[in-house]
Image (spheres, rainbow, N blue to C red):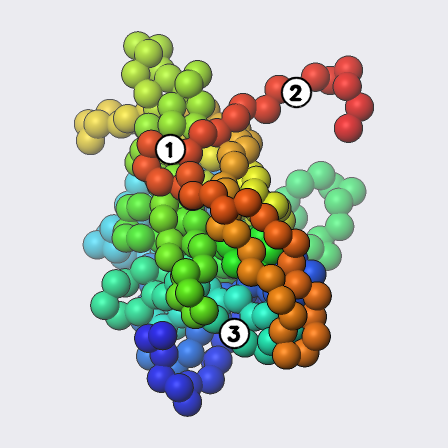
Amino acid sequence: PGIVQLETFTMLGEGLSYDGSSVAFWGAWGSETKDVTLCCPSTGNKDRRDYCLNNDTDTLCDGNSGCVTDNNPDGCYQSKTVPVNQGVFVHDTCSGETRLVAEANASNNHTFVFWNYSGKPPGSGNADESDAAESPRYRSAAFVALSEGNAVVYKMQINNTTVGIFYATQKGKNNFVSTPVIETGQNCTDLDPLAVDATVQPLLVESLAIERDSFRGKYLAIAAACGAIVNEDDEDSDEGDWGGIYLTELRKSKSKTGKSERGCKAPKKGKATRSLAKEGQQKFVRGVYDENTPV
């Protein structure tokens, strides 16, 4: 749905989530592209920040780039090209069918591609460390996790300021319906009742992460970082910030029975239950770490 029948993939993501019979992945099609502006990091490792500002040959500087901060006064950035038409897919190795789960295009301006400036600046670190590691550069990735072929969790940038984790379930043969699990900008107390500031006001979710094995059975594990609300005239700081790994239960619809044309074994029967991935219904659990308990 939404893709011309004769279109073929032009790009495929490296991050694959496999459940034993189906595989979820990111892919792009068509020739249409767009440029994205990636500001040099203003937080994190100082050597890496300085490399982006002063040594990286892909870096451009413009005071009108929208990247100006105290640590990046010249507005230094890099420009990268991404496909306009991209999506999250599930391929059934039993039937040979590939189904579209979620789509980004010119009309919705979403994207599943996320960027991170990583690597080791030459000469940084301890003197006895090797410089064989790659120099810093922007690297891209898409994040998707699959459970039992008909339930998918993925990370998507909704607009310039909001990133969300979404839960998609199969409705009918080819259609998936997505609902938000958690988004940046939400109260962090939706994840953790202890995520409040000194005045007991909720912190806000600032970043979210999943991995390919984050979703197994009916359980989803995510990582989240939260911070206090910052007014325009206030200086942002890390004091009082909050982060954690959280687990929630996402219930799936009943699996279908029967064998495919290629004789794949049918999935086990499951109870028909409604999704909990709706606003106000997700329940996350804080992990408790005990250093005396072996893993």
Q: Badge 2: few (under 14), some or many (20 or more) residues near its Cα, within 10 Å?
A: few
Q: Which residue is mark 2?
A: 289
- In the image, residue 113 lies at what x, y percent? 44, 60
Label 3, secondary structure: give it.
strand
Label 1 vs label 3: CA separation?
31 Å
The answer to whether residue 197 is above or below residue 108 is above
Residue depicted at x 23% and y 68%: 107
Label 2 vs label 3: CA separation?
41 Å
Quick one: label 1 or label 2, which is nearer the N terminus? 1
Label 2, secondary structure: give it.
loop
Disc sitting over residue 60 in the figure: none
Q: Which residue is mark 1?
A: 281
Residue projecting furthest to the front: 258
Q: Which residue is mark 3?
A: 98
Q: Nearer the viewer, mark 1 or mark 2?
A: 1
Residue depicted at x 53% and y 31%: 246
Rendered-image quadrant of the N terminus: bottom left
Observer able to see residue 291: yes
Label 1, secondary structure: give it.
loop
- In the image, residue 207 lies at what x, y percent? 42, 39
State how many labels appear: 3
291 vs 125, nearest the viewer:
291
Three-letter residue code for mark 3: Thr
79 vs 172, nearest the viewer:
172
Label 1 vs label 2: CA separation?
26 Å
Task: Give left or right: position of 261 versus 29.
Answer: right
- In the image, residue 206 lies at what x, y percent? 38, 36
